[in-house]
Amino acid sequence: MKNFIYIFILILLSCVRNSTLYNFDSYLSCSDTLAAEKLESELFTTEYPKLHDAGTRLIATSELKHGFIQLIDKQSGKVITSMGNIGRGPDEMISPTGQHFNRYTNKLYISDNYLKKLFIYKIINDSIELIDKQNIPADFFLNRLKSINDTLFVAINYYPHQSIHLLNNKWDTINKVSYKSFDNPEITQYENNKRDNIMMDVMPGKNLIIIADSDMPLIKAYSYHNNQLKLVWEKMLDEPSYLVKNGWREIQDNQRNGFINMSVTDDYIYLLSTGKTYGEWIQAFSSTGKGIEYQYLMVFDYKGTHLKSIYLRNPMYNLTVTSNNNNIHGINFEGDKILRYSLNNVK
């Protein structure tokens, strides 16, 4: 009887501890509700283009269309010019997967894993011009690439080791660390065929690399002082709920969804969340075709402290935040309209 009571108390304490450690609903308590302004944009008709803040302009990039780079007027949303072709001709790409605009250098970087090349563009007046091409090592599979400056890059390499690489401009790996969500020895397959479950951005002013998971609400920050990568902090917003089958991690229906997209400025981290569980997301998507009719924008500082959450009436697949933190621009789930949210009056 005493043993039974002791075990019951341990279970009770465990439940209390977990409810204190993981309180996802607290992140859904919103300080404001915002509606978006829809800009008269003429974007790609393909799904899920990426959007990049470029000062007085926006840049939209896609992977599937001719003219897959678009320079856009930020106020009106109208396309100023487009360039870039899919194909095997001079300066054409086959698989433009890694796409990043560095607002500090005014350069757009697009890596092609099939051609093993990096294409570098720069905004010059009302045009985007190709200024350089570089070869990528044949054994390196770049799916996420960010430019810290002209001589230092960070990339996520999914296969075969799921690692973050710090690279010089000759594509030598200076340092690398694993970014695996769990150190579970039973998980031997790391979803090598699932390239998009991790997103990444950089905060050069803080020497930080931020990654977020789209499968689970997990955020991590790595520093790169003295060319050494080091985990600084990590946050799991909900208690992990998964099974391991044949070496694969299988997320359960009661697991809260990860993040849809992320953007960072010098001081803040902005994350889009559905607030739903995996099961709710699948059910909503199968019934509406979209999956969500609203979103939560979660804001953290560079130390990982949650500052606020904002309820967004118009959901976005992609977002980018202005450097002064005044406005957010994003692309709707149909991929054809730019949405703008003003943060000027947000508490």
Image (cartoon, grey):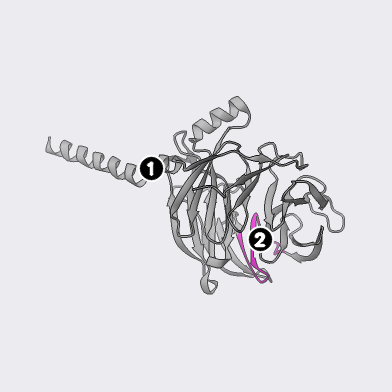
Residue 246 seen from this side: no
Task: Measuring from the top left, give residue 280's x and y in whole percent.
Answer: 50, 31
Task: Residue under label 2, please give it.
Answer: 140
**For residue 5, what is the image quadrant?**
top left
Calculate the distance from the C-alpha at mark 1 to the C-alpha at mark 2.
39 Å
Within 10 Å of disc 2 (Cα), the crowding (few <14, some 14-19, many 20+) is: some
217 within the magenta span:
no
Q: Secondary structure at mark 1?
A: loop
Within 10 Å of disc 1 (Cα), the crowding (few <14, some 14-19, many 20+) is: few
Residue at left offset 49%, top offset 35%: 276
Residue at left offset 55%, top offset 59%: 163
Q: Amino acid at mark 1?
A: Asn
**For residue 272, what is the image quadrant?**
top right
Q: Secondary structure at mark 2?
A: loop
Rendered view: 259 above or below 118: above
Task: Measuring from the top left, give residue 204's x and y in whole percent.
Answer: 58, 66
Rendered view: 186 above or below 127: above
Task: Residue under label 1, please give it.
Answer: 23
Rendered view: 196 above or below 136: above
150 within the magenta span:
yes
Q: Which residues are magenta?
A: 136-155
Residue at left offset 59%, top offset 27%: 286
**For residue 340, what is the image quadrant?**
top right
